[in-house]
Image (cartoon, rainbow, N blue to C red):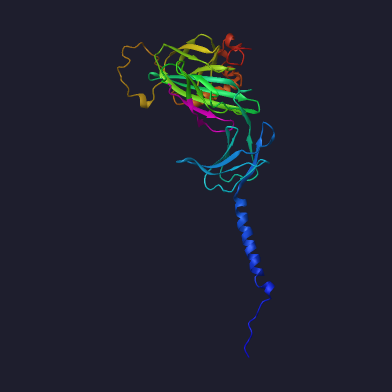
Amino acid sequence: MKSQPCRRPPGLRFGPYREVRKALAALILSLPLHAAITGEVVNQSTGKPQQGATVALYKLGMQNGLELIDQAKSDPQGHFTINQEPQGGPHLLRTAFDGVTYNHMLPPGSPTTGLTLEVFNSSKQPGEAKVTKHMILLEPSGGQVQVNETYLFSNPGKTAWNDPDNGTLRFFLPEGTGGKVQVNATAPGGMPLGTPVKRVSRNENIFASDFAVKPGETRFDLTYSVPYTEGADYAGRILTKDENTYLIVPDGITLAGDNLNDLGTEPRTKAHIFGLSGNKYSVKLTGQVAAGPADAGGDAGADSDASPRIEQIMPRVYGQAKLIIGLSLGILALGFALLYRAQPSQSSPAVAAKGSDGRGRR
């Protein structure tokens, strides 16, 4: 008698396999969700979720800079999902809304789900944005004056100031620069970024920088150089409506001119700080920053017929503009209390009587 093959009931023949396939399919579908970058875009001007904002994921590379990985739009509830998992080094989320971009860093190992990205409505009008401090550091050396200008914008409102046509920062470049200037801008909580510059008026050497001034504090740093002749007039103009304007020179450099309020020295670097009244200045600089090793091989007879110069060996600060400006900002923020405390015997009654702002007002 032949044995009959064992037959499974029809309903059970593929049942277990179907369940396995369903489980695998569910697992595969769930993988992108676990690896996704998710969050919500919130408009801080309205206090509501923002629809239609573009959220882009970039990889930060040493050689290629920003490399776009993927992007998504926020839905009517402000939610967004980017089905990519950051791999390797740091990444950046850049949110574009109303003509302005907002950056959110994603360091390795940081959370990538449930993020809140802030945006603001923008306007071509400055609104409440204003320059609270403007510092001009003059460093004469080797026949040139290196100029570092720092503008601090404060925007206490809830609207970003963005004017691509006219720029947000307008500034004047003195004669002798040839229109060459480097501008870096730092958004609130951000990092310095190179900023496009365009000439607004060729006849008056007026330039503009296109960088949005968002709510919070935005910083602009300008660097340029002009020819230097000791004792010659050096003139400039202030185009912004500064609350406080300061001229600063390193230790060993003398600055003289009208409309200057002597505010003393910064204790650590000994840089001298002057408050400026008005929107123009014409000053005379004497002395120069001591030449470093790279400059020591100049023409020995170049100054043979020149008048005697300061013989004191001064600290090399030509490359320390950030340190001088940073420390000076700290001192200015404290209303010069530390400055006067550091040298009470040297402060004249006229200086001590001045107020804390750069224009010498009480």
User: Looking at the image, is 230 positioned above or below residue 110?
Assistant: above
User: Is 184 contained in the magenta span?
Assistant: yes
Could you say which is closer to the camera, residue 321 or residue 241? Answer: 241
Outermost residue on the bottom side: it is 1
User: Looking at the image, is 244 positioned above or below residue 49?
Assistant: above
Could you say which is closer to the camera, residue 293 or residue 194? Answer: 194
Q: Tell me which residue sits at (60%, 50%) in the image.
A: 35
Could you say which is closer to the camera, residue 340 or residue 186? Answer: 186
Q: Which residues are magenta?
A: 179-197
Measured as percent of width and height from the top left, residue 13 is found at: 65, 73
Q: Tell me which residue sits at (64%, 58%) in the image.
A: 26
Asked if one can make out residue 10 in the rendered structure from this viewpoint, the answer is: yes
Q: Tell me which residue sits at (58%, 24%) in the image.
A: 153
Asked if one can make out residue 250 in the rendered structure from this viewpoint, the answer is: no
Q: Quadrant of the N terminus?
A: bottom right
Q: Quadrant of the C terminus?
A: top right
Asked if residue 147 lies left or right of residue 74, the reply is left
User: Is 277 contained in the magenta span?
Assistant: no
Q: Quadrant of residue 74?
A: top right
Measured as percent of width and height from the top left, residue 34 is found at: 62, 51
Measured as percent of width and height from the top left, residue 169 is found at: 54, 23
Measured as percent of width and height from the top left, residue 131 is found at: 58, 21
Q: Tell me which residue sits at (65%, 38%) in the image.
A: 51
Asked if residue 147 lies left or right of residue 342, the reply is left
